[in-house]
Image (cartoon, rainbow, N blue to C red):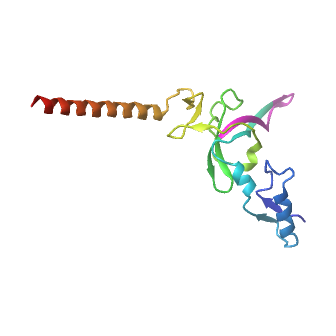
């Protein structure tokens, strides 16, 4: 019996992966049902800002003659990884206009098996406070109110107040 290898089970990079074959050969004959190892290939791909297609679960209601029945389904949404946790877990921000944009737009911590594929797009850019930026503006949802704008305004006000104080000091010392 072949053991279940973590993180290779349902990994988005498993097609043609040489690391899985090498590790499977090492653990063959041990009698283990599941084994785990650190995958450098998945660790390098799973990074903050990486663009992905993520599987988002949904509930499908099917009308039948006997009444409504619900079954599980899923959407495939494009997203950007905004946090990577140990054990190949991550959180992501689903792009606007996707199926699950509503209350599930900012995803909770998920396993790497939710990634359908990695996209060949440039990595996302984040502001100083960690919000994803799209077209130079922070993407914070419908209200579009990122704290980095408030911090920038406060910093500008502090600089203006310091310049005024310096000017006051110069004028005050020149008058005496």
Give the percent coordinates (x, y) of residue 18.
85, 57
Q: Is residue 36 left or right of residue 95?
A: right
Q: Quadrant of the N terminus?
A: bottom right
Query: Outermost residue toward the front?
Result: 174
Q: Is residue 176 magenta?
A: no
* The quarter of the displayed image where residue 73 is located: top right
Q: Is residue 99 above or below residue 1?
A: above
Provide the major secondary structure of the magenta segment. Answer: strand
Give the percent coordinates (x, y) of residue 20.
83, 59
Q: Nearer the viewer, residue 142 or 102?
A: 142
Give the percent coordinates (x, y) of residue 37.
74, 63
Q: Residue at x 68, y 42 (%)?
A: 50
* The quarter of the displayed image where residue 56 is located: top right
Q: Is residue 96 above or below residue 22?
A: above
Q: Residue at x 84, y 63 (%)?
A: 22
Q: Residue at x 79, y 51 (%)?
A: 11
Q: Nearer the viewer, residue 44 or 99?
A: 44
Visible residue check, residue 163? yes
Visible residue check, residue 111? no
Q: Residue at x 69, y 53 (%)?
A: 88
Give the percent coordinates (x, y) of residue 12.
79, 47
**Range of residues picked out in magenta:** 62-80
Q: Nearer the viewer, residue 141 or 128?
A: 128
Q: Is residue 79 magenta?
A: yes
């Amino acid at each position: 019996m072949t053991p279940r290898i973590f993180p290779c089970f349902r990994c988005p990079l498993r097609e043609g992966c040489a690391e899985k074959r090498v590790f499977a050969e090492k653990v063959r004959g041990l009698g283990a049902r599941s084994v785990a190892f650190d995958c450098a290939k998945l660790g390098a791909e799973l990074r903050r800002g990486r663009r992905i297609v993520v599987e988002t679960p949904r509930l499908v209601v099917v009308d039948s003659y006997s009444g409504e029945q619900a079954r599980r389904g899923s959407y495939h949404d494009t997203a950007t990884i905004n946090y990577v946790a140990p054990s190949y877990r991550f959180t992501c921000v689903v792009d606007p206009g996707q199926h699950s944009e509503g209350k599930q737009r900012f995803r909770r911590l998920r396993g790497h098996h939710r990634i359908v594929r990695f996209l060949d797009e440039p990595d996302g850019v984040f502001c100083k406070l960690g919000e994803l930026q799209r077209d130079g503006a922070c993407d914070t949802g419908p209200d579009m109110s990122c704290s980095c704008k408030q911090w920038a305004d406060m910093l500008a006000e502090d600089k203006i107040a310091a310049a005024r104080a310096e000017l006051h000091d110069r004028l005050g010392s020149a008058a005496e």
